[in-house]
Image (cartoon, grey):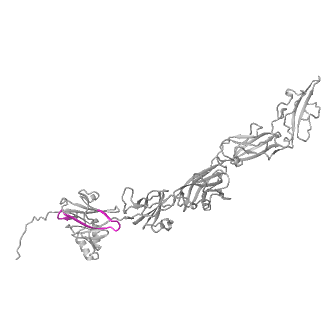
Amino acid sequence: MDEKGQSYNASNDEANITLPHEPALYGIALEVLDNAGNVKSARRFVMFDKSSEIKINFLKHLKVDSASPETNYIWQTHRKRSCLSWDDRYYNSYNYRFNLLRKIQKDFHGVFQGIYEQQTGILPVSGTKNVHGITSFYYSWFKENQEVSAEVAIPNFPDQKLCVDLGVKDGETHTITITSKDLMENTLSENITFYVDASVPDIEEVWLSKDGVRQLFVHNSTDLAQMVLQFKTFDSHSGLYSIEYFLGTSRGGNELAYKTLAVHILENKSCDSFVDCYCPSVGPCENALYTVKFNHLIKNNTNTGQHNRAYYFTVKVTNGARLVAIEHVDILADDSPPVKGVVVEGPEGYPDIDYTSEESVIVRWNGFIDHESGIMKYRIGIGEHCLSAAEMNVYSHDLPNNSSLYESSEAYLKVNLPHDGLYYVSVLAYNNALEPSEVACSDGVFRDTTPTKVTDLTLESAKVKPVIGCYDNKVWHIFENLTAYELQKTERCNIACNSTMTMQLVQYLPKRNRYSNHSSYSTAMCTKLSSFSENWFIYLPSDKIKLRWALEENESQIQKVYTGFGSTSSASMSPDLISYLETKKFNEYHIVHSGLDPGIPVYAFVKVKNKADLTTLVPFGPIIIDETPPLYRGNVAVIKDP
């Protein structure tokens, strides 16, 4: 403070002092004189400044010290405290050159003592703490453009730094506002923004690609230049900065290839209309799928590999926060296809089946071997003929009619058989280089949903009472020898059928149609004969039984035929008199002595099972064995003609 000054007389308790226009620190001394001539002095200081302002020294920097220098202090790569500094960046335009806040010279004469000296307050004699005229710093905090903390004084002034735990998380954007203030309440605020990413980029799905199929780790040729490798890489927080790849004969080796890939940025585009892309928290949207072709190996003469040898591909990806991720994948060169196997229909542990009534069948195969890279998958074709390799490698809409394709990693598959007919199953095995084997084809399986039809069933020596039988909306004359003759549906025959029960046995009997258009004969028989009823029987003169029948089986073959005998028609599932026994011939059953009791109604059952496991059950009866001749109890009279 300049010792020069002006004196003022004051008779009252106040004095008006006019200050100059220039900024300056003024000392005001008050001297009090009493009537006895005693004098006491006190002083106070006042600073006048109406022109200075706070400015920025652009040679000094406001920076986030906790952020990575490699990112120019933009990305903080840890989740600990965030620290900022701004050494000598802010200053008061006047006090930077003439610091009015420095320590004030002492009163060497001892005039101002104790409370009469300005020891405290805004401008104490000891000076005011400041940094180039700045007397305090404040900060406020914004996260994702939302205010989290209002203006807070920065402690430990005059330190020009701040460390605070903001609880940062990956992908967040933080903005800190630093405000400088001087003694005249001038302020200047400056923002700094930093981002957080403490995680390395993601590298996923590194594999070879062939014919649109990914997830391969075996190359199908020793020519390495034909390889096409794909991988996904992304960083959802800071995006990607650089991509490098290496190819060598050892992990991390690069003697065969080393190249960089450009990061694919979607300029002025969003990710909504693109596949395999993403938009990081900071920065433009980027592509996530990258394809590497190795044509450049030919130029370097490093494209020729060896069969059954491993090669190592390494991807090194650096994100925007300069954090690095490295991924390795082993690639096997395999130029030999798998060995062809065999295909059978039917579940494991069961013999090959040739017929089925089901709408699906389990198909299995074995013997497909690849010693180098192993079997990756199987392609299965179902069709009306054995499919060729070309037919099994086409799109579904180019398949032959009534054919379908499946893929499986297992050595079995349940396939659909949509309709009756003969199906063949063809199988291709692919190794892990996606090289196919030769096609193996099954011997075929026939789907048959129609059971065997039994017709022309006869019982030798059997006799019946002729009756009118009605079945399948037709009228039949059942002759004594169990032959059914179709009659014309005359009015009388319709009446006969409307009042009688259906005769199910007709469907199995020999049939003739001699009278089907003979109305007079039909009417006469329907008038004369009684209709079929529950009291109608088939009679045999002995227990010798000889049944014959015809079988109609157009799809499957006959597997087995059984006969049995029961006491009622409902015993067909499990005959209670003679259990089912397999017949020696498919169309005949013959036994000399059946052992059946005479005089008791029995039923014969014929069970036919075809190779599609469909069963036909035919009940035949009721049969009564009658071995006694007729008995006449009257008298025999002999009359002589006159």
Residue 482 in the image: x percent, y percent? 23, 69
Residue 97 in the image: x percent, y percent? 86, 41
Residue 322 in the image: x percent, y percent? 66, 49
| Camera-side residue of 174 and 492 | 174
- Tell me which corner region of the image, top left, top right, bottom left or bottom right, holds residue 561: bottom left
- Tell me which corner region of the image, top left, top right, bottom left or bottom right, holds residue 134: top right
Taking the image as shown, residue 529 lies to the left or right of residue 156, namely: left
Image quadrant occupied by the N terminus: top right
Q: Count the labels in the image.
A: 0
Taking the image as shown, residue 121 lies to the left or right of residue 533, namely: right
- From this viewpoint, is residue 544 visible? yes
Taking the image as shown, residue 128 lies to the left or right of residue 474, namely: right
591 falls in the magenta region: no
- From this viewpoint, is residue 13 visible? no
Residue 115 in the image: x percent, y percent? 85, 27
554 falls in the magenta region: yes
Q: Is residue 549 above or below residue 319?
A: below
Q: Residue at x 79, y 42 (%)?
A: 88
| Camera-side residue of 22 and 642 | 22
Image quadrant occupied by the C terminus: bottom left
| Camera-side residue of 5 and 7 | 5
Q: Where are the magenta residues, as a range?
A: 539-560
- Tell me which corner region of the image, top left, top right, bottom left or bottom right, holds residue 108: top right
